[in-house]
Image (cartoon, rainbow, N blue to C red):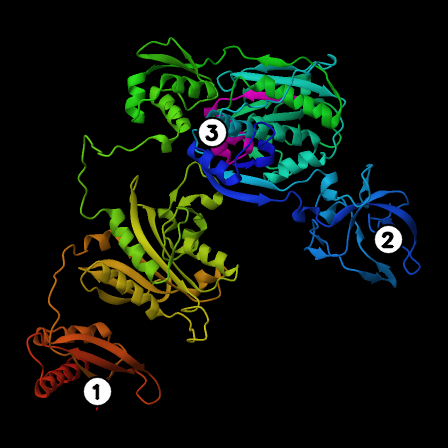
Amino acid sequence: MKISLNWLKEYIDIQETPEELSHLLTMTGLEVETIEKVETVPGGLRGVVIAEIIECGKHPNADKLSITKVDAGELHLLPIVCGAPNVAVGQKVLVATVGTTLYPQQGGEFVIKKAKIRGEVSEGMICAEDELGMGNSHEGIMVLATDLPNGTPASTYFNMEDDIIFEIGLTPNRADATSHLGVARDIRAVSGRDIKWPNVSAFKVDHHSSNIRVAVEEADGCPRYSGVSISNLIIRESPYWLKNRLLAIGQEPVNNVVDATNFVLHELGQPLHAFDADKIQGRKVIVKTLPEQTNFVTLDQKPRKLYAGDLMICDEQGGMCIAGIFGGYESGITESTTNIFLESAYFSPDYIRKTSLLHGLKTDAAFRFERGTDPHLTVYALQRAAMLIKELAGGEISSDIVDIYPEAIMPVKVPMKFKYIQRLIGKALDENTIFDILKRLDIATDEISKEGFVATVPPYRVDVTREADVIEEILRIYGYDNIELKENLSTDFLASFPEHTEDAIQLKAADLLISNGYFEISTNSLTKPQYAEKADFLEASESVVILNKLSEDLGVLRQSLVFSGLEVIAHNINRKQTNLKIFEFGTVYKKSGIGNYEEKKKISIWLSGKNHQETWIAPNKSVAFHDMSAIVYKLIQKYNAAAPTTKMLDEGLFGYGMSLSIDGNELAKLGLLNPKICKSHSIDQEVYYAEIDFALLSSVMTKSFTVSEISKFPEVRRDLSLVIDKSVTFEQIGQIVSDQEFAGILKDINVFDYYVGEKIEKDKKAYALNFILQDKNKTLTDQEIDRIMGRLMEKFESNLGAVIRK
C-alpha cells in the first residue's frame, strides 16, 4: 500500500523526517518496506515557465508552422517556431526553455536545444499537455488562464512539489490502516497530535428530483447500504491537484467522478461506486444474489459467469455491479453521463473474499472490503464524495441520503485486568498511561475498578476482539523499545532441539551453493498445465488440479521445478543477464493413485552462459556438463554421503545426462536440458540442469565424522596415460583404484587430460590420469611405488582392455 507524505500532511501535523516517520510507522506495526522520492510529472517541469505570446505570424517556408516571439521573463523576447494550430497573440502558455529536458507521454525524453527550423531560429518550445508528460492531449498547446508574471516556473502554477511515497507492507489484520487517515490515526496514537478530518458540514440536498429506490434482499452480505443521487453534472478531466494526488500513489486518473471516488477511497478507506443513474432500469437498486452461471460483463468488457453466492448490485433488469469488487460495463460512467447514483456500503468480508477468489479479481475496493471496513463511515464518506463531485463536476444533490442499516453493528466490549496487562507486556504501566493510549486509539474505557476495566472497541478495529488484542494495542503504541530487558532472564520451559533439523540441513546446501556463486530463487508452486501436457517425461494425468484457480496459467501444482527455473532464466536473458547460476529448494506434486497425492522436496540447479564475467585476468568460456557435475558432487560430499553409482540417462528432459544413485535409489539426475524445452521458453543458449532428491540426500547424510592426524610422510604423484573403449566409465576406473589391495596407499585419482580424435581409433578415448600415493606410517620407496603402479596397469589391461601409453 502506497502512502503519500504530502497527502498525509493534510490530515495531521508531520514533524518527523521521512526516515523518522518510517521508523515510527514500522514500530506501530505498519512496516515501511521502501521510501521513494517521486515527481508527479517526470522532471518536475524544471525549465518550463509561464510565457506570453507577443507576436505570431506564418512561417515563410512552412504552411503549418508559425513564428512567434514570447515573453518568458528573459531580457529579450524568445523566437520560437510552433506547429500548434491554436497558437495566437496574447495567450499565456508554457515554454520549455533551451536546456530543458522533457519527458513526453509517448517516446523517450529529449532536451530542448537552440535550433533552426526551416531556416528560422527557435529558442525553446511552446508545449502541449502530452509533451510535458501531464496528459494525453495533443490537440494544441496549453493555454493558461493566469495573472502570474511571465517567467514564473510552471511548477508554481500547478502547485507541484516533490513527494515522498511510503510503501507499507500491510498485514491482513490492519484493515483500519488502508487509507491516509488510517495511517494518520496511528501517528496520532503515538504522538498525541490531532487529526484534521475533512469537514462535511456544508453538505445539503439541493432538491428531490431523483426517485431512485433501494432494496437490500441479501442483508447478511450487506449489513449497511447508503446512497445518494447527483444530477446535471459534467464528466470531464480532473484538475491537476487531484490527478497529482492519484498519480503519486500509482493510480491512473480516469475522469472527475471516478477520480473523486478513488480519492475518497484512499483518503478514508471507504470504497464507493458511481452508477449512471439514467441506466438504472426501473429506477431501483437491489442488493441480492443472482442464479448460478448468470452472464455478466464487467467494466473491463470481459464476460463472466456468476457463482451462486456472488453478491450483486442489480436493477430490475439484472446485474449492474459485482458488489464491492468490480463495476459492470453497462452501468458505468461515460463522457455522456449527466446523472449518477453514488453508492457507499458496508459489505460482509466473507462474501467479498469468496467472490474475489472465485473470479480472480483483486481490486482496491475488494482489498478493503475483504479485510473489513468501518460500517459507521458509509454516510460520512458519501457526504465527502458528493461534495467533492459537486466541486469538480458541478450538478446538484438531488435526493436525500438513502441509508439502509436495519441492525447496527455495535462496538466490542472486552473485559480487562491490570495484572494481565502487566504480565503480557512485562512491565507495570501507569493506569493513566494505559487510558491515554486507549483514548488515542478510539477505544473507550468504562467500569473502571482497582482490578481492571472494560474496553469498548469501535467496529472499524475488526482485529481487536480479545483481551490479548487490546494489550497488544497498548504495547505497540507505548513502544516495544520502551520495554526494558531484565538483567536475568528466565523461562518456564526449555525446549529440546533435534540435532539436525530440515532447515539446518537445507541451510548447509544453500551456503555451499551461494559460496560457489549461485543465487537462490523462489518461484510459485502453481504453474501452467501445458507444461506437463507437452513434456514427454511427465504425465499430464498426474497433475494436481487447483479447484479455485486464480487463472489458467496457475491451474495446477508443478510436477517439476525445471519450468519455473527456465521462466526465471528467460526473464534474466531478456534483460541482458546471460551468465546465470541459480538454485531453488521447492516441492513437487503429483497424483498417486485414486485420491492420493505425493509430495517431494527437491533441490534444483540451473547453469547457463559463461563460467564467469569477462575480465582481462582470465578468458571466460561457456559452462559445460562438468561444471554442473562438479557442484552436484560437492553437495554430496558436503553431506558426507557415500559415493554414488552412475548411469547414463535417456529421457526427454535432457539432451544428454547422468543419473546418480545410492543403494539403488535415484539421488540426482543432471545434464544438458533438451534444446526443445529451452526453445519453448525462447532460450537459445544451452542450459544445464540438476535435480536432487532432498529427502534422500538428508537421509544418507553421515552425521558423524572422524578426525585423524595429518601424515608426516610425503605424498608422491605418478601419471599414467591409457587408451580405453568409449563405453568405459571413470567410475569403473575408480572401482579398480579403490580395491582393497591399494587401500591406505592410493589417496586420490584425477583426470588431467582427455582426448578423442584421429590419432586413436574411433571407438576409443584416451585418459591422462594422475595418482596420489601416501603411506601414513613411512616414506614410500621407488620399488614400492613401481610395484603398485605395475599392479594398477595390469588390472586396467585385464579388466578394462586398456592400452597403456608409455
Q: Residues within 10 Å of mark 3 (few under 14, many from 20)?
A: many
Q: Is residue 420 above or below residue 632?
A: above
Front tag of 3 and 2: 2
**Secondary-structure class at tag 1:** strand
**Secondary-structure class at tag 2:** loop
Q: Amino acid at mark 1?
A: Val
What's the residue at 19%, 42% (across, down)?
497
Answer yes or no: do the residues labelled 3 and 2 have beta carbons within 8 Å? no
> Nearest the camera: 520 or 691?
520
Residue 209: which quarter of the image? top right
Q: Amino acid at mark 2?
A: His
* 365 drawn magenta: yes
Front tag of 1 and 3: 3
Q: Which comes sooner in the sequence, label 3 or label 2?
A: 2
Q: Which residue position is annotated with label 2? A: 76
Q: Which residue position is annotated with label 3? A: 353
